[in-house]
Amino acid sequence: TEMDLVRGFQEFDEDDSGCMDLREFNSWMFAVGIDTLSVEDISFVVEALDDDRSGNVEIRELVQMYRRFSREKMQNAEEEDEMDPSFLLKEKDTLIDAEMNDAANEAAAEAAAARKRMEDRKAIKAAAAAAEEKGKKKKKDRGRRR
């Protein structure tokens, strides 16, 4: 883990400077089991990690490298999952569920709109019927007055 990396770094940072020189870094690499690299290879690794070109590896630089490789490892694992048939089937089911949910929501919205139109037509018919009834009543009342 990242905490193990920091602890190991601190253990081999003999002068507690917050960075490892080539000798300290080489000792650390040997301690973690990377003992087949030449001094030139170790120098190359230090140079690759040393983004501020101080000649040393700072804890910050090592943690940045660790996080970058961790992200890449996770992305690779996700890409592998995406190629796994069981993942694809699950993803297909998720998409189908989402499509069915969208279709159900759309149908419910259409049904609500149709219900509203029907209620509006009923209200218009009722208003028209009331107006017609009122008109008949007025006509009848006029006929009685004569």
Image: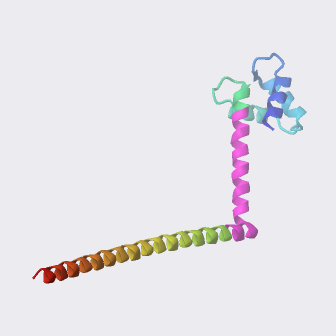
Position of residue 142 relative to residue 98, above or below, is below
Q: Residue at x 86, y 28 (%)?
A: 27
Q: At x 80% / y 17%, what residue is drawn?
A: 16
Q: Residue furthest left?
A: 146
Q: Quadrant of the C terminus?
A: bottom left
Q: Is residue 68 magenta?
A: yes
- Residue occupying the point 66% across, 67% down: 94
Name the one closer to the observer, 26 or 141.
Answer: 141
Residue visible at 48% across and 70% down? 109
Helix, strand or loop: magenta stretch: helix
Judge whether residue 112 is colored magenta: no
Which residue is the extreme one toward the front? 145
Q: Position of residue 39 (x, y in %)?
A: 81, 32
Q: Relative to residue 78, is residue 93 depicted above or below? A: below
Q: Quadrant of the N terminus?
A: top right
- Stretch in magenta: 63-91
State the residue in front, 79 or 106. 106
Q: Nearer the viewer, residue 24 or 78?
A: 78
Indicate the quadrant where residue 45 lies.
Answer: top right
Depicted 5 relative to depicted 99: above or below: above
In the displayed structure, 19 sits above or below 65; it is: above
Q: Residue 6 appears at what percent x and percent y? A: 79, 29
On the image, the x and y values in percent for residue 93 come to 67, 71
Residue 18 placed where, x, y %? 75, 21
Quadrant in the picture for residue 7 = top right
Q: Quadrant of residue 22?
A: top right
Q: Is residue 38 left or right of residue 106?
A: right
Residue 34 or 19: which is nearer the viewer? Answer: 19
In screen coordinates, is 62 left or right of 135?
Answer: right
Horizontally, is 111 left or right of 66 in the view?
Answer: left
